[in-house]
C-alpha cells in the first residue's frame, strides 16, 4: 500500500491544478465570450464588402484593418514587424499579431501562439473553390469563425485578474488559402525566437458545431495532451473527436513541421465549404461560443502550467489507422465456466439451460438441467453476484448441484478457464498517453460492464488517485476495497464510475 502511494506521488502532475479562486476567475472570464459578439464579428468579416478576404486584395486589407483596430483597442502589444501589429510578406499580404505578456519574470519569454487565418478565397477560382466561381466567397465558417473566436478569446484573457506565466501571442494569418503562406512566413521569420514558442493552437472553421462534436487534431504532439484537454473539457462538455491525422491542411502544420507541439480545433466540413454559400447566417454562434470558451480554458492553463511536455516527433507519422489499431477491441475472452441458465429459475440456485462443449463446466461433469446450488462454498442467491464470483474465483472451484433423478446433491470440482479477474477488463498502454490505460476488453456481465465501461475508454484515476502505468493500475484493482471509483474519459468527457467489486481476498 505504501508503495502504491509513493508511486502515485511521482506520477504526472495533475493537468488542472488551479485553486478555487483561480478557477472562478477563469469561469467568469470565459463567460464573457458570448455568441452575440462572435456572430457580430462574423457578420462584419463575412460581409460582401470584404469581397471574400483574398490575401493581397482590397477586401483582405480591409479585414486586416478591422483586426488591427480590435487588437489596438484591447491594449495588446504589437507582435509583428518592428513591434507593429502587422507582419508584411509576399504580394501585399500581412499577418496581424498581438502579444499579451506573461506574469512570470522567467517564463514570460516563452510564448504560446494562438492562431486563426483571416483570409479566404475572394471570388473563387478553379484552384480554390468548388464553385460557382466569380461570386463573393464570404468564408463565414472558413475562417471568419476562427478569427472571431480568437478575438473574443483575447478579450477573455484581458478579463483575468492576472495573466498566465507565459506570454500569449494572438496571430491572424494571411494567405492560408494560398498554401499556409502566413504561418509559413512567420515560422521562417519569427518575431520572437522560435525556440521560445512552446505551443501553438490553431482555430480553423469552428462555426458549424453539430452534436457537440469538436474535432481535435494534434493531441499526440506532446505526451499527455489528450488527458489535459479532456480535463479542461469538464467545463464545456463538448464531445472531443481526437483525430490523429496531421497534414499540411492548415496553419498548425507549419508549427509542427518546426517541432512545436500544436492542436487544431475544427467543427467539420459541410456542403458550403469553399463555395459562395459559406455565409454568416449559417454559422452556429452558440457552438462558436462553446469552442472559444474551451480554447480559452486550454490556452490559459497551458500558458500557466509549470512544465510543458516535449515535442513528440512520432506524432507526425501516426494516422487514423494506427489509432484504430491502438483502440481495437480484443476478441472476447473464453468464458471461465461455459454455461447458460434459465432466466426464470424458481426455487433456489440456477438451472442450467446450456453447457458449452469442452468448456470448464462440461469437463467438470455439469449437465443441462442441473440446478447449481453453491459455488465455492457460497449459496447462489443472485445472478449478478454469481457472475462476479465466477469471474473472480481461483481454480479449481467446488460446486454443489442438484441433479434430476439423483437423491443427494452432488459435489463437483471444476477447473475454470482463464485467469481470475475482479473487474473484468483488459487494456493497452501507449507512450503518448502516459498514466492512462485504454480499455480493450470489457467482459460481459462483469462489474466493469455493469458500471458502463466500454472498449476505448481511457482510465485516468482509480480510487481517486492517478497512477503511473498499467502495473500500478493493476495493483490498485487488486488491493483497493469495493466500491471502487474510477475517472474515465470517453470522447473527451470525464465521468466518475463506481464499480461494485467482490471483496478482497483474505490472503
Ligand atoms: Zn480554413
Image: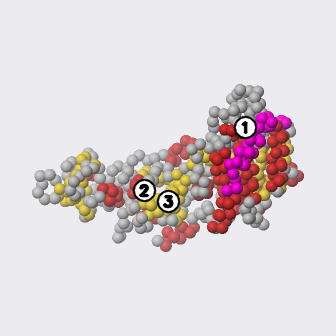
Between residue 275 and residue 464, name the one nearer to us.
275
Q: Give the label on residue 327, or none.
A: none
Q: Over which residues does the magenta segment extend?
A: 30-58
SS of the residue at dot 2?
loop
- Give the Cα separation between the discs numbered 1 and 2: 45 Å
The reply to whether discs 1 and 2 touch (Cβ–Cβ < 8 Å) is no
Quarter of the image with the C terminus is bottom left
Total number of numbered labels?
A: 3
Q: Residue at x 66, y 38 (%)?
A: 282
The reply to whether discs 3 and 1 touch (Cβ–Cβ < 8 Å) is no
Q: Give the label on residue 496, or none.
A: 3
Local packing at callout 1 (Cα closer than 10 Å; few below 14, some 14-19, many 20+) is many
Rendered view: 68 above or below 500: above
Between residue 392 and residue 147, name the one nearer to us.
147
Residue 106 position by quadrant: bottom right
Local packing at callout 3 (Cα closer than 10 Å; few below 14, some 14-19, many 20+) is some
- Give the Cα separation between the discs numbered 3 and 2: 10 Å
Mark 3 or 1, nearer chain start: 1
Q: Main secondary structure of the magenta part?
A: helix
Q: Which residue is mark 1?
A: 139
Q: Nearer the viewer, mark 1 or mark 2?
A: 1
Q: Does the segment drawn in magenta span residue 48?
A: yes
Q: Which residue is mark 2?
A: 451
User: In the rendering, at what x and y percent does residue 5 appear?
Assistant: 51, 70
User: In the rendering, at what x and y percent does residue 15 appear?
Assistant: 61, 61
Q: Residue at x 85, y 36 (%)?
A: 58
- Give the Cα separation between the discs numbered 3 and 1: 41 Å
Question: Cβ of disc 2 within 8 Å of ligand 1?
Answer: no
The reply to whether discs 3 and 2 touch (Cβ–Cβ < 8 Å) is no
Question: Cβ of disc 1 within 8 Å of ligand 1?
Answer: yes
Rendered view: 272 above or below 265: above
Q: Residue at x 77, y 41 (%)?
A: 45
Amino acid at each position: 500500500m505504501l508503495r502504491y502511494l509513493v508511486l502515485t506521488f511521482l506520477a504526472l502532475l495533475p493537468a488542472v491544478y488551479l485553486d478555487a479562486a483561480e478557477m472562478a476567475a477563469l469561469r467568469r472570464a470565459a463567460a464573457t465570450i458570448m455568441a452575440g459578439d462572435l456572430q457580430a464579428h462574423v457578420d462584419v468579416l463575412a460581409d460582401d464588402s470584404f469581397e471574400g478576404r483574398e490575401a493581397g486584395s482590397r477586401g483582405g486589407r480591409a479585414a486586416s484593418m478591422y483586426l488591427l483596430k480590435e487588437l489596438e483597442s484591447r491594449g495588446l502589444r504589437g507582435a509583428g514587424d518592428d513591434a507593429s501589429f502587422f507582419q508584411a510578406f509576399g504580394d501585399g499580404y500581412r499577418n496581424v499579431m498581438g502579444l499579451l505578456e506573461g506574469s512570470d519574470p522567467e517564463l514570460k519569454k516563452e510564448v504560446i501562439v494562438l492562431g486563426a487565418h483571416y483570409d479566404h478565397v475572394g471570388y473563387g477560382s478553379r484552384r480554390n473553390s468548388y464553385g460557382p466561381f466569380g461570386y463573393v466567397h464570404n468564408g463565414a465558417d472558413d475562417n471568419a469563425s476562427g478569427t472571431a473566436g480568437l478575438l473574443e478569446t483575447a478579450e477573455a484573457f484581458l478579463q483575468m485578474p492576472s495573466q498566465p506565466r507565459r506570454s500569449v501571442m494572438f496571430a491572424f494569418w494571411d494567405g492560408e488559402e494560398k498554401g499556409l503562406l502566413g504561418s509559413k512566413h512567420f515560422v521562417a521569420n519569427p518575431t520572437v525566437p522560435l525556440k521560445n514558442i512552446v505551443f501553438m493552437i490553431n482555430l480553423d472553421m469552428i462555426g458549424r458545431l453539430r452534436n457537440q462534436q469538436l474535432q481535435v487534431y494534434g493531441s499526440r504532439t506532446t505526451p499527455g495532451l489528450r488527458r489535459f484537454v479532456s480535463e479542461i473539457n469538464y467545463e464545456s462538455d463538448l464531445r472531443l473527436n481526437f483525430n490523429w491525422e496531421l497534414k499540411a491542411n492548415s496553419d498548425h502544420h507549419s508549427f509542427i513541421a518546426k517541432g512545436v507541439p500544436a492542436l487544431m480545433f475544427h467543427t467539420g466540413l459541410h456542403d458550403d465549404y469553399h463555395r459562395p454559400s459559406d455565409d454568416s447566417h449559417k454559422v452556429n454562434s452558440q457552438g462558436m461560443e462553446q469552442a472559444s470558451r474551451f480554447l480559452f480554458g486550454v490556452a490559459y492553463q497551458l500558458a500557466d502550467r509549470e512544465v510543458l511536455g516535449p515535442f513528440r516527433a512520432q506524432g507526425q507519422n501516426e494516422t487514423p489507422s494506427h489509432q484504430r489499431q491502438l483502440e481495437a477491441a480484443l476478441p472476447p475472452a473464453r468464458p471461465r465456466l461455459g454455461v447458460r441458465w434459465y432466466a426464470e429459475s424458481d426455487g433456489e440456485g440456477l438451472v442450467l439451460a446450456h453447457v458449452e462443449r469442452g468448456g470448464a463446466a462440461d469437463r467438470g461433469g455439469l449437465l443441462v438441467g442441473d440446478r447449481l446450488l453453491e459455488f465455492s462454498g457460497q449459496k447462489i442467491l443472485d445472478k449478478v453476484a454469481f457472475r462476479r464470483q465466477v469471474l473472480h474465483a481461483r481454480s479449481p472451484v467446488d460446486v454443489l448441484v442438484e441433479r434430476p433423478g439423483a437423491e443427494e446433491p452432488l459435489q463437483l470440482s471444476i477447473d475454470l478457464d482463464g485467469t481470475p479477474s475482479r473487474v473484468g477488463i483488459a487494456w493497452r498502454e501507449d507512450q503518448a498517453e502516459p498514466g492512462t490505460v485504454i480499455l480493450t476488453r470489457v467482459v460481459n456481465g462483469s462489474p466493469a460492464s455493469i458500471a458502463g465501461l466500454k472498449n476505448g475508454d481511457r482510465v485516468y484515476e482509480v480510487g481517486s488517485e492517478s497512477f503511473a502505468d498499467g502495473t500500478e493500475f493493476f495493483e490498485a484493482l487488486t488491493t483497493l476495497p469495493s466500491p471502487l471509483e474510477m475517472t474515465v474519459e470517453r470522447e473527451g468527457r470525464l465521468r466518475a464510475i463506481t464499480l461494485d467489486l467482490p471483496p478482497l481476498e483474505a490472503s
